[in-house]
């Protein structure tokens, strides 16, 4: 979801995106610039495949983690997953990556970057929650554990 969100709302300027955060992180870990900037061609476009792998890996890991934790701790589903999306944004884009020097300090990032990243993470987790709930209902034929199966009679 984040991947698609960044097309209409690019979080970084073209200059800052010349080496995007996943590429910068890999360079900090010792990977060569040539490797992290490896591209594949599709329809005349050079696509940063290594960056895509990191983005998709991150998204899949946290989606699965969210779904597993939601079964045991339903509070993680606050605002249909949007709160967890905001938590991930703050944790990585406001605290961890700036502390590592992967991205600029939050006050040195443009407002457009915060807007794109924060809302992107909200929509990403919200869409995961919609799919999680639908798949859970289809597989178990029951609502989430914290949802009562019967409605109390209002006349009692």
Image: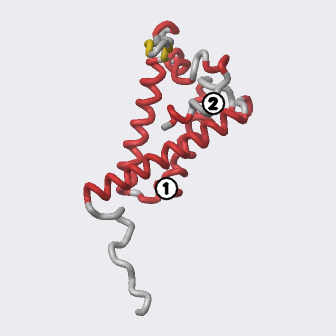
The residue indicated by pointer 1 is: 80
Mark 2, residues whose alpha carbon is within 10 Å: few (<14), some, or many (≥20)? many
Q: Earlier in the sequence, mark 2 or mark 1?
A: 2
Label 1 residue SS: helix
In the rendered image, residue 87, in percent from the top left (x then y), is placed at 55, 45
Q: Is residue 31 visible?
A: no
Mark 1, residues whose alpha carbon is within 10 Å: few (<14), some, or many (≥20)? some
Label 2 residue SS: loop
Q: CA distance from mark 2 to mark 1?
A: 24 Å
Residue at x 61% of width, y 20% of height: 17
Report whether 102 appears left or right of 49. right
Residue at x 44% of width, y 32% of height: 58
**Residue 143 to residue 66: above or below:** below
**Residue 146 to residue 38: above or below:** below
In the rendered image, residue 50, in percent from the top left (x then y), is placed at 45, 18
Residue at x 44% of width, y 18% of height: 49
State the residue in front, 137 or 83: 137
- Which image quarter holds the C terminus? bottom left
In the rendered image, residue 85, in percent from the top left (x then y), is placed at 53, 45
Residue at x 50% of width, y 12% of height: 37
Report whether 57 appears left or right of 87. left
In the rendered image, residue 100, in percent from the top left (x then y), is placed at 59, 26
State the residue in front, 120 or 42: 42
Q: Is residue 12 visible?
A: yes
- Mark carried by residue 41: none
Q: Quadrant of residue 133?
A: bottom left
User: Looking at this rendering, what residue extends furthest in the bottom direction?
Assistant: 156
The residue indicated by pointer 2 is: 11
Q: How many marks?
A: 2
Q: Quadrant of residue 63?
A: top left
């Amino acid at each position: 979801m984040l991947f698609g969100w960044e097309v209409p709302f690019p979080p970084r300027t073209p200059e800052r995106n010349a080496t995007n955060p996943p590429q910068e992180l890999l360079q900090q870990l010792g990977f060569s610039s040539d490797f992290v900037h490896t591209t594949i061609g599709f329809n005349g476009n050079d696509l940063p495949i290594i960056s895509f792998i990191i983005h998709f890996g991150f998204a899949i890991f946290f989606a699965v983690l969210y779904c597993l934790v939601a079964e045991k701790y339903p509070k993680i589903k606050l605002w249909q997953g949007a709160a967890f999306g905001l938590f991930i944004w703050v944790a990585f884009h406001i605290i961890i990556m700036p502390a590592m020097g992967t991205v600029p300090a939050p006050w040195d990032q443009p407002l457009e970057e915060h807007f794109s990243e924060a809302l992107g993470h909200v929509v990403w987790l919200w869409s995961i929650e919609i799919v999680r709930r639908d798949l859970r209902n289809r597989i178990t034929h029951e609502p989430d554990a914290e949802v009562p199966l019967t409605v109390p009679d209002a006349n009692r």
